[in-house]
Structure formats: C-alpha cells, structure tokens
Image (cartoon, rainbow, N blue to C red):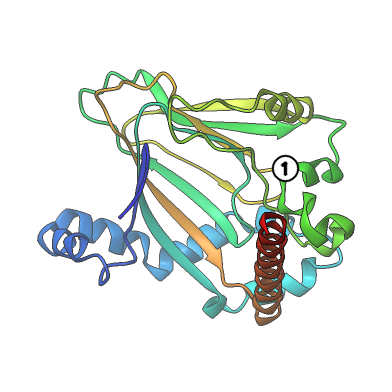
Amino acid sequence: MQNLGNRMAVNLDLINPIEDLGKFLETSVVWRDYVEAWKSPDVLMSLLHRFAPAVKNRYQWPWRWILLRRLKNRSNLELTVLLSVYRRGFQLTPHSDDRYKLISLIHYLPELDSASKGNGGTSFYVPKSRTKRRHLRQFSPWSGGFRQYLPLWLSPILEAGLTRRYFESEQIDSNERNTFEKFFSKACDVGYARNRISGFVKNDWSFHEVDLTNFPSSEIRRAVLINVRVHPSRIVERISQFESRIVRMKKALTRGAESDKLI
C-alpha cells in the first residue's frame, strides 16, 4: 500500500508482495470474484471492441497505423485493477493520464449513508475551439529537458497534467490553472454515487479531475480503477532508459557545481 498524504492506493494485481491484501482476497469471496470478473479476457475484448474507433483515432500521424498493429497482438495488452482511496483536501488536478493507458473506467464505491451529495466524482474537460496540440506542451514533459527542442509530432500521444495537491493546506498554482482554462472548458461532472461507472479513452485531450475540497471530512472517497494498458515497445523502453541517464547525469553535474561553489 502506498501512503501519499491524503491519498492511498492499493494495486490489486500485486497480490504476493502485499501479504495483507492477499489474505483479504483469499477470505473475501465477493472481492475475489469481482477482480477476477474484470480481469476476464472476455471483458478486455469487449472493451476494445466497444471503444475501437476512439482507440484507433488516439494516435497521431504518422504513428497511427504502426502502433495499431501492436494492439492487434493481445500479448501487448493488459487489464489492471486498482483500488484508490482519497481523503478530503486531496485534489487530482486536470491531467490526461499516462501514454500507455488505452481505456480507463472508474467504479465509485461510496458508503451506504454517504453525505457526499455527489462530491468526489470526476470532472471531465474538453478543448476549446482554438486549442491546438502545441498548447499542451507547457503541461507535459515536452516543456523541459532536451524534449523541449523537439517537434511534438515525434510523440504518438502526449501525457500532460497540472501540479497536484496532496494536502488541504497546499496552494494550487493559480497561474497554471488560469492558463489551462484558456484552452479547456469543463464538459461535465460525474457525481460520486453507488453503482455508477464513468470512463474515457486516453488521448491527448482526455483531461479529467478529482477535487475533494468539499468532500465530507469523516468519509473516505473510494473507487476501483479498471485500466486497459499497452506495454511499451523495446524502442520506447530504451529511449526512457536514455532519458533517465541524462537526468541522472544532469543532477550529478548540478551537485558537482554546487560543491565547487562551497569550496
């Protein structure tokens, strides 16, 4: 279990490393069946079939047909189930999710006598008519490092987001938020309610938000996240390894320069 201030998350796929969770699933027939039902190959195929047009159009040219071929190989795909727990004050500011996610579903699990009155759901955003892909760079990793000098068409799909708030006492960057609202407007709010599932297909524009500013302080916001993901290719893994080395080298050089100043 990860403890991130007002956010805790347990990955239901990591049964063995998390002894307590393993015991829980062994003794809870309902939850074991629930997880196994979602992870059925039939569910994966049904989701891919249902959202095929949106999945197909999520990639940029000239990558679309190359990457769609990878999706035809089911060994490149996986379905994960994540139990997510939040507390009042946490704010998952607008973000589009990581690039390896294809489809995301959110199953809300409020208490039977919840006083949330719908607070704790998910807000979805849409780009304004004048918004272009280049406007997303400032919210993505392509705004810094060596990637800031590269054209965006080199990225088949972008992952972007605003700075998150983990504690109620932390302040949100109002300038960053105002900039975001110049290019996006809220499309809808999906309320936090029993037997309700919301979802989306990940693309450059799939910005969504969870704001628990007004969530009841006596309750815990619970949801199960069901994600269809594509494994990164070997080329992408090597590029990521190269980027990590560059970052480590940059940090080492920075520390060295600071040490020289102290001397």
Mark 1, secondary structure of its residue: helix
Report whether 86 appears left or right of 114. Answer: right
Residue 29, above or below 240:
above
Q: Residue furthest left?
A: 27
Question: How many labels sit on residues?
Answer: 1
Residue 34 image position (x, y, % from top left)? 27, 56
Q: Nearer the viewer, residue 253 or 45?
A: 253
Residue 138 image position (x, y, % from top left)? 78, 42
Quadrant in the rendering for residue 29: bottom left
Q: On the image, numbered disc 1 is attached to which residue?
A: 139
Q: Nearer the viewer, residue 246 or 40?
A: 246
Which quadrant is the C terminus positioned in?
bottom right
What residue is rendered at 86% in x and 45% in y?
134
Residue 90 image position (x, y, % from top left)? 43, 32
Instruction: Give amino acid for label 1.
Output: Phe
What residue is rendered at 66% in x and 23% in y?
174
Report whether 58 appears left or right of 120. Answer: right
Residue 215 image position (x, y, % from top left)? 37, 22
Report whether 255 appears left or right of 75. Answer: right
